Image (cartoon, grey):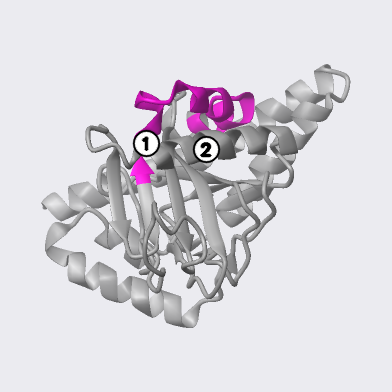
């Protein structure tokens, strides 16, 4: 009986999400018309439509070279601060790779770049309200960068296993990243299976702890038979995606992967 009730609420959530996207598209298209063909609302309408269709969207050159230089300078400061034994940073680390979490608690400068209009719109669609994102710095390298601060060689990226992230067990989770250095297949681009969040077996298995092994097996099965997309890009690009889609970090063969993640 409890499983039936859980499934009922999941279906309600699933369809309410689609309705929210539909309404958002219509409202923004209407504003676009009455604002005398405002370029901002036209572009926003296209982004929302593409996100709804694919489960992700990439916005080229979203940040200027000057803004990326500024973000890289702050990120390097954060990395240097990890050497301080008394730092209060939440750090996850493996050879050649580091994730530094909850950065806006200490470095308020990041908020200037992660609370703009487009991010607010997507946050409201996902969460019914605007949520200021958690900011996470992720750097991985082949041994030729940041040797004193991130020792070793990254042979296994953090989060390199195909997985799903969901709020409260089954709800969609908006995530994104700002590309701080050019990102390609060679230096570990994130991979995603578009629209895998719609898979009925995945939806049924989500939030059922006793079926976690089944969920992992189902994710593995879908990954083996599906075509994935590599979220590559140039520094300054912004990527937003529904992380209830199956996704994972690609292999880093050479170079450096440097991303500023935003979790809503």
Q: Residue 122 occupies which quadrant of the picture?
A: top right
As rendered, which of 255 and 216 lies closer to the eye? 255
24 w.r.t. 235: above or below: above
Instruction: Find numbered disc 2 in the image and state the secondary structure of the residue it sits on.
Output: helix
Farthest residue to the front: give it. Answer: 148
Q: CA distance from mark 1 to mark 2?
A: 45 Å
Quickly name the residue at label 2: 19
73 w.r.t. 150: above or below: above
Residue 42 picture location, percent across and down: 79, 33
117 w.r.t. 126: above or below: above
Residue at the (69%, 53%) spot, across then down: 234
Quickly name the residue at label 1: 81
Q: Residue 161 occupies which quadrant of the picture?
A: bottom left
Instruction: Kindly report the secondary structure that dominates the magenta region of the rendered protein.
Output: helix
Residue 118 picture location, percent across and down: 62, 30
Examine the rendering and report whether any part of residue 99 can be seen.
yes
Instruction: Find numbered disc 1 in the image and state the secondary structure of the residue it sits on.
Output: helix
Residue at the (43%, 63%) spot, across then down: 246
Q: Is residue 98 left or right of residue 85?
A: right
Residue at the (59%, 67%) spot, across then down: 229
As for residue 99 lying within the magenta part, the answer is: no
Q: Which residues are magenta?
A: 100-123
């Amino acid at each position: 009986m409890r499983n039936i009730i859980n499934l009922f609420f999941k279906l309600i959530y699933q369809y309410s999400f689609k309705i929210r996207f539909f309404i958002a598209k219509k409202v923004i298209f209407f504003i676009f018309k009455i604002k005398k063909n405002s370029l901002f609302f036209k572009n926003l309408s296209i982004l929302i439509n593409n996100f709804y269709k694919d489960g992700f969207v990439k916005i080229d050159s979203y940040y200027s070279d000057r803004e990326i230089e500024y973000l890289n300078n702050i990120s390097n400061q954060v990395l240097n601060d990890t050497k301080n034994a008394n730092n209060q940073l939440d750090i996850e680390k493996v050879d050649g790779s580091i994730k530094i979490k909850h950065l806006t608690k200490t470095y308020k400068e990041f908020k200037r770049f992660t609370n703009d209009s487009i991010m607010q719109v997507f946050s409201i669609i996902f969460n019914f309200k605007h949520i200021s994102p958690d900011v996470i710095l992720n750097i991985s390298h082949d041994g030729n960068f940041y040797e004193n601060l991130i020792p070793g060689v990254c042979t296994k990226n953090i989060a390199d296993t195909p997985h799903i992230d969901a709020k409260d067990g089954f709800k969609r989770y908006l995530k994104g990243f700002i590309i701080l250095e050019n990102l390609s297949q060679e230096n570990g681009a994130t991979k995603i299976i578009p629209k895998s969040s719609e898979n009925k077996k995945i939806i049924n298995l989500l939030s059922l702890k006793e079926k976690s092994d089944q969920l992992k097996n189902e994710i593995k099965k879908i990954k083996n038979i599906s075509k994935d997309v590599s979220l590559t890009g140039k520094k300054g690009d912004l990527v937003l995606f529904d992380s209830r889609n199956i996704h994972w970090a690609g292999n880093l063969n050479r170079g450096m992967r440097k991303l500023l993640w935003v979790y809503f």
